[in-house]
Amino acid sequence: MTPVYTATSTLLIESKEAKVVSIEEVYGLPGANSEYFQTQFEILRSRDLAREVVRAYSLTDEPEFNPFHENAERGFSLRDLLKGEPTEPPSDERIFEATVYRFWKTVTVTPIRNTQLVDVSVESESPLLARELADAVCKEYIRSKLREKIGVTKEASSFLQERLGSLKTQLAESERKLQAYRDEHGLVDLAGVDTLVTQEIDQITRQLVQARTRRLELESTYRRLQAMDEYSMQSLAALPAIVSHPVVVSLRNKETEAELRISELSKRYGEMHPKMIAARSELASVEDSLLVQMKRIAESFENDFETALDKEKSLVQAMDVAKSQAESINENQFELTSLIREVEANRQLYDLFFTRINETAATGDLELPSARIVDPAVAPGSPSKPNKKFVLAVVVFFSLMLGVTLVLLIDLLDATIKNPDEVDRKLATYLLGVLPLMGGRRNRRKGAEPEMLVRAFAENTEHGFTESVRTIRTSLTLASMQVPAKVMLVTSSVPFEGKTTLSCNLSEAFGQVEKTLLIDADMRRPSVAKKLGLTPHAPGLSNAVVAPESLEECIQPVDDLGIDVMSSGPIPPNPLELLGSESFRSLLATLSSRYDRIIIDSAPVHAVSDAVYLSTLVDGVVYVVKADATKDSLVKKGLERMKQNQARILGVVLNQVDVERERKYTGSYAGYYDTYGYTHTNNKLN
């Protein structure tokens, strides 16, 4: 990989440009905000700025950036391979754009957090060229900002000059309209007129309220007087407004006094006494005067009501006239105010543009940059790419990840049973025990265990193996405490899973405490006699079934193992018919009466049907599974076949477990043998 060098130049971007006169509105200068800086960063990253640098520094002559240069390196490209060699040479525009693209890909802009600084980095195969181009990007950015400012200034001046003339004309036209309106309506100052009319309306309103109140007060009495046919003392006395009149009240008092005087005189004089006559005459005079006054008061009420009604109507008319005058004044005032506001707005806009054009003219030639280089680039002394340590670390990391992934994938796809946990999880069957792998992994690959293991328990050559067999014997004893299992069948799913080895060692283990018989019922591939070193071609199971009288000859005692063995004998043409005969059942019953424990080594379940049939005759079945070899599906099918035939499954024995590997990866067997005092260097049992 070609070494690549990276040079970095630090640029300061001002949030506000320096200015002589306040003309921010003309240039549109932003404040110090994140949007402004993000925009400037994107301008630094833009391809247009890269074009200016390529054009200014003639980078099309550099083979590093020009892919069409005669000295440029040609990398492998599948697209070029499929398209083939170009028939025509590339155009200048295509060469330029390709150079711009390559240079643009080498530019990196990195803002420095919480500052107005930004690092501009350029990668190149030459450290000097990287330094020069890093500064070139910053300088070209500053030049572009200055060009932008000058262009904006010129455009602003041209725009202001054009608008100023039209604004002046617009101001003169609005002033002319204002003056014409004033002349037309004879308006000088509407403020005083408006105040006078307002006061007049207020005064008329108060008088109108008083007149209306007075009219309402008189209207009730007037309506009742109009309803009377004639004015009588009784009808007029029913009106509170007349009765409460002071004149009426005074006459009523005199009437009362006259009545009291007549009452007193009547007690002393007769009716025809001159004083009585005079008193009655006085009372009649008072009553006549009272009626006359009440009639006059009634007539005065009628006149007062009509007067109040006429006054109210006149005040209403005066109010309508005043409102009309106010509305007229408001209309004139609204139009006049609108014209005045238009004149003021045009004048302010004209003054604003006049001020701006003067500011623009004063600062048109002033070029103040909005950015500057605070730390020029330095030629790097060492390449930034390739980072050999990083590449190596990545390769190692991904290699390890790939290895772990493959291991996990293989383990996930592995359908075998490797440890006791999987027996419970996959088979849901009781685990009787575990037999460790003996003799190395080579025997596992061959598919068989060493023949010496058939005597391992009795000879105590492998202490760990011996203890495992003893554990299985204990598990079987506990499993048959409630329901005895005198006759046990040992089988497996397929050949070479170690069922014969387990049968022999399990018989030796029971032989230490019970009278035990080992029967080789694998009539198709017998191996017990050969592995135990017994007399070949000796009578065995087939002879005992055919000729029960020869039973004693068919049993071979093995004194060093402490057990009796019945080999398979001559292989019959159809072993299943022999095992399914009534003679075999009778033989099994006879042997059960003579021995405390009978262990039958049978053929695999999936090889032939012998084991399935024998499982219905025995008290329990021990199922052997070779660890990390037999598929769990085969084991499940074998157990299911026996359960369908009502066989009693005592449990599973996991054979050839790699204890060292399980201890290393899972820790499940850490200290498994040391707990019982079994080690490779200790040959004595604790």
Image: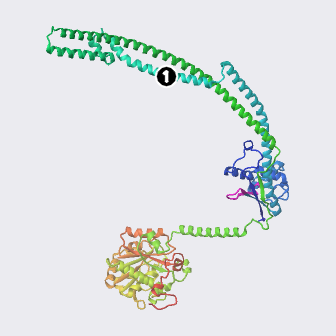
Question: Residue 75 at x, y = what percent?
Answer: 78, 60
- Tell me which corner region of the image, top left, top right, bottom left or bottom right, holds residue 385: bottom right
Mark 1, Cα crowd under 10 Å, few <14 / some 14-19 / many 20+, is some
Residue 527 appears in the figure = yes
669 or 117: nearer the eye?
A: 117
Query: Which residue does the numbered mark 1 point to in the structure image?
Result: 205
Kindly identify the residue that appears in the image at 45 percent across and 16 percent down: 312
Residue type at tag 1: Thr
Q: Residue at x 57, y 23 (%)?
A: 196
Task: Magenta stretch: give its range.
Answer: 102-117
Task: Look at the image and say whether residue 634 sits in the magenta stretch.
Answer: no
| Image quarter of residue 151 | top right
Please tell me which residue lies in front, 384 or 220. 220
* Percent position of residue 472, x then y: 41, 80
Type of colouring: rainbow
Q: Which residue is at a point 80% across and 57% down the rendered structure image?
A: 135
Q: Is residue 344 above or below residue 418?
A: above
Closest to the observer: 58 or 501? 58
Helix, strand or loop under label 1? helix
